Amino acid sequence: MNKAQLVEAIADKLGGRQQAADAVDAVLDAIVRSTVAGDRVSVTGFGSFEKVDRPARYARNPQTGERVRVKKTSVPRFRAGQGFKDLVSGTKKLPKGGEVSVKKAPKGSLTGGSSAASATVKKAAAKKATTAKKAAAAAKTTVAKKTTAKKTTATAKKTVAKTAVAKKAAPAAKKATVKKAAATAKKTTATAKKTAPAAKKATAATKAPAKKTATRKATAKKTTARKTK
């Protein structure tokens, strides 16, 4: 069974796969961190995890038989609890249904690492909650951006439609203006044609008395000249 299969196995009991994955990650993270720090993590009936220091020593290469010096190192060690051993050996029967009856750990049974383990679990939960909040905020921001983009696109489409309507209406307006100007010009021309004869008559009437007056003056001059002779 790998980690994914372990998560699937406990998913139904924890209310979902995500909750099961979070629980497994939190437990493993707490165990690893406490063991690396040198604390012994002990679960009654299941077993204990601890860090073991191995001093520098000499070993033999199994292939060549050559003696090799091994540096000082530290390794993790797991020791199964008595209840776990009894179930594996067959001394106790594994129940067919339900959970395995492993004794609950009394208070303080997590030797040396209980506070560190709980703190690690809390930190992990806080980190996941923060990540979830950030993801939710990012999702809201994305939705808001998409909504704004849709509104902007709709406004742009309306503007383009109005511009197209204005362009279509412009030629009609120009034609109407030209027609009005032509009609006005025709009316003005007709009025001018009507007033032209009257103006000619008035001019002719004005010129006629002037001619008569000039003729009279010329006749008077001639008469005066004759009398003088």
Image (cartoon, grey):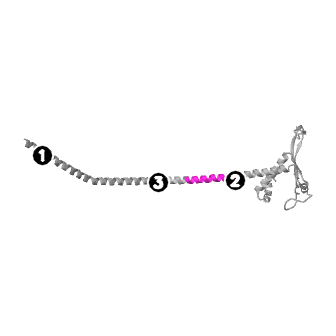
| Residue numbers of the magenta segment | 135-155
Q: Where is residue 177 in the image (x, y as percent from the top left)?
A: 40, 53
Q: Position of residue 59 (x, y in %)?
A: 90, 39
Q: In this view, does 213 lie to the left or right of 79?
A: left
Q: Which of marks 3 and 1 is in front?
A: 1
Q: Is residue 54 or residue 160 the one in the foreground?
A: 160
- Which residue type does callout 3 highlight? Lys
Residue 136 got which mark?
A: 2
**Magenta-colored stretch includes residue 128:** no
User: Dot 2: within a 10 Å radius of its alpha carbon, few (fewer than 14), some, or many (20 or more) residues?
Assistant: few
The CA distance from mark 3 to mark 2 is 48 Å
Q: In this view, does 165 lie to the left or right of 187?
A: right
| Rendered residue at 36%/53% (across/down) | 182
Residue at the extreme right of the image, as rendered: 91
Q: What element carries label 2?
A: helix
Where does label 1 land, which residue?
220
Type of secondary structure dominating the magenta stretch: helix
Quarter where residue 14 is shown: bottom right
Residue 168 got which mark?
A: 3
Q: Which of marks 3 and 2 is in front?
A: 2
The CA distance from mark 3 to mark 1 is 78 Å
**Magenta-colored stretch includes residue 145:** yes
| Rendered residue at 43%/54% (across/down) | 173
The CA distance from mark 1 to mark 2 is 120 Å
Q: In this view, does 137 lie to the left or right of 194?
A: right
Going from N to C along the chain, the mark reached first, 3 or 1, is 3
Residue 18 got which mark?
A: none
| Rendered residue at 48%/54% (across/down) | 165
Going from N to C along the chain, the mark reached first, 1 or 2, is 2
Q: Is residue 178 visible?
A: yes
Q: Where is residue 105 in the image (x, y as percent from the top left)?
A: 88, 55
